[in-house]
Amino acid sequence: SYVLTQPPSVSVAPGQTARITCGGKNFGTKSVHWYQQKPGQAPVLVVYEDGDRPSGIPERFSGSNSGNTATLTIGRVGAGDEADYYCQVWDTFSDHVLFGGGTKLTVL
Amino acid sequence: QVQVVESGGGVVQPGGSLRLSCAASGFTFSSYGMHWVRQAPGTGLEWVALIRYDGSKKYYTDSVKGRFTISRDNSGNTLYLQMNSLRSEDTAVYFCAKDRGGATTIMDYWGQGTLVTVSS
């Protein structure tokens, strides 16, 4: 079955840029979406269709998708960005939604 | 504004049943697909089920097929998840989420979740 692979954790200093990756086979044929989840809260969509942002999401959040890897990039990271981040696709072969295992972003 | 509010969670014994509800407001419910997603304690997100806007198609993750049923009442703006033959591994917070619509499957609004605990 199709699997999405994320690093368990990423750490970055305040003001720097965080990059969170999501690996999957033949990603170029799929649209990848990203969610942010803070402790005790519901997930929030932050990037969709590889690189678009919903209204209200800062421009610091961006995404890209190339080959077998999608990347969520967060610029000028602050303490408020500490959260778990999940990538997601729709697998047309199985007709299932798939989530990556999640990446915990720590701001040092 | 768009709101989805889950209810119906609680403690149930293994083998028991529970029905979750999700009340939607702030958008034309009958025009959008809806999802259930769960999160076991300390773990990541797991998609459970999707129902298309008119209820014509339903999709399930393999571990709940034959035990869970997703349904909707478009006249009452409510989504449901009937859960039967519950197991300890079904213990989780269950989120209801609106699908954004269009060609891809994106969850653009989420509820706060309802906790289901399967325990004797």
Image (cartoon, coloured by chain):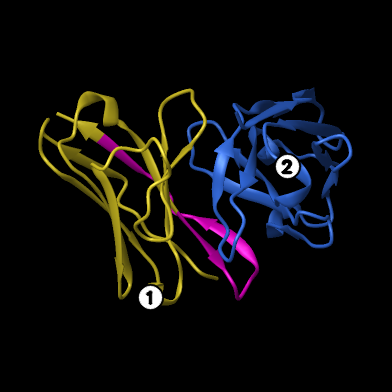
SS for dot 1: helix
Residue to which mark 2 is pinned: B28
Left or right: where A51 falls relative to B35: left
* Numbered mark located on residue A70 in the image: none
Left or right: where B99 falls relative to B88: left
The magenta span reads A88-105
Residue drawn at (63%, 33%) of the image: B92
Mark 1: few/some/many CA within 10 Å (<14, 14-19, 20+): some
Q: Colour of chain A?
A: yellow
Q: Nearer the viewer, residue B109 or B90?
A: B109
Q: Colour of chain B?
A: blue
Q: Position of residue B98 (x, y in %)?
A: 64, 43
- Res B54 quadrant in image: bottom right
Q: Position of residue A5 (x, y in %)?
A: 38, 59
Residue to which mark 1 is pinned: A28
Q: Chain of mark 1?
A: A
Mark 1 or 2, closer to the camera? 2
Q: Position of residue A78 (x, y in %)?
A: 19, 28
Amino acid residing under circle 2: Thr
Q: How far is the residue under mark 1 from the one under mark 2? A: 32 Å
SS for dot 2: loop
Q: Nearer the viewer, residue A83 or B5?
A: B5
Residue drawn at (70%, 52%) of the image: B33
Residue drawn at (83%, 50%) of the image: B67
Magenta stretch encompasses residue A85:
no
- Res B29 quadrant in image: top right
Question: What is the magenta segment's predominant secondary structure?
Answer: strand
Query: Which quadrant does the N terminus of chain A fall into?
Result: bottom right
Q: In the rendered image, is residue B31 in sight?
A: yes
Q: Nearer the viewer, residue B48 or B72?
A: B72
Amino acid residing under circle 1: Gly
